[in-house]
Amino acid sequence: MDREERRKRFKGVIGVTVTPFDSDYEIDYGKMYNLTEWWVENGMVRDK
């Protein structure tokens, strides 16, 4: 993908998600799944 294609594809706000960790500082994949579901349900998807 060249620069012009990226400019057309990526426009508007680009959301940044956090990586959740548990009390042992391991990635909490369950919480990450839930956060991802929340983002998608609330509009952080392409072409919406």
Image (cartoon, rainbow, N blue to C red):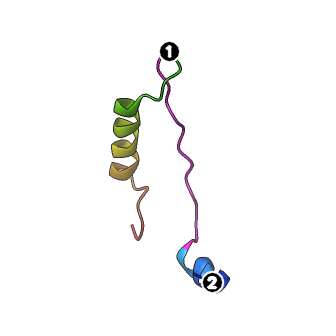
Disc 1 residue crowd, few under 14, some 14–19, many 20+, Cα 10 Å: few
Farthest residue in the right direction? 3
Question: What residue lies at 47% left-to-right and 29% top-to-bottom?
Answer: 27
Task: Give the camera-side residue of 29 and 37.
Answer: 29
Residue 12: x %, y % from top left? 58, 67
Which label's residue is closer to the chain start, 1 or 2? 2
Question: What residue lies at 38% left-to-right and 31% top-to-bottom?
Answer: 31
Farthest residue in the top direction? 23
Q: Is residue 27 above or below residue 38?
A: above
Q: Is residue 40 above or below residue 34?
A: below
Evaluate if marks 1 and 2 touch, with contact meaning CB atoms under 8 Å apart.
no
| Residue receiving disc 2 | 2
Magenta region: which residues?
A: 10-23
Q: How far is disc 1 from disc 2 in space, using C-alphas?
A: 41 Å
Residue 22: x %, y % from top left? 46, 20
Task: Give the camera-side residue of 44 and 25.
Answer: 25
Question: What residue lies at 49% left-to-right and 24% top-to-bottom?
Answer: 26
Q: Secondary structure at mark 1?
A: loop
Residue 19: x %, y % from top left? 52, 36
Question: What residue lies at 35% left-to-right and 39% top-to-bottom?
Answer: 33
Q: Is residue 1 above or below residue 28?
A: below
Taking 10 as reference, is 27 left or right?
Answer: left
Disc 2 residue crowd, few under 14, some 14–19, many 20+, Cα 10 Å: few
| Residue receiving disc 1 | 24
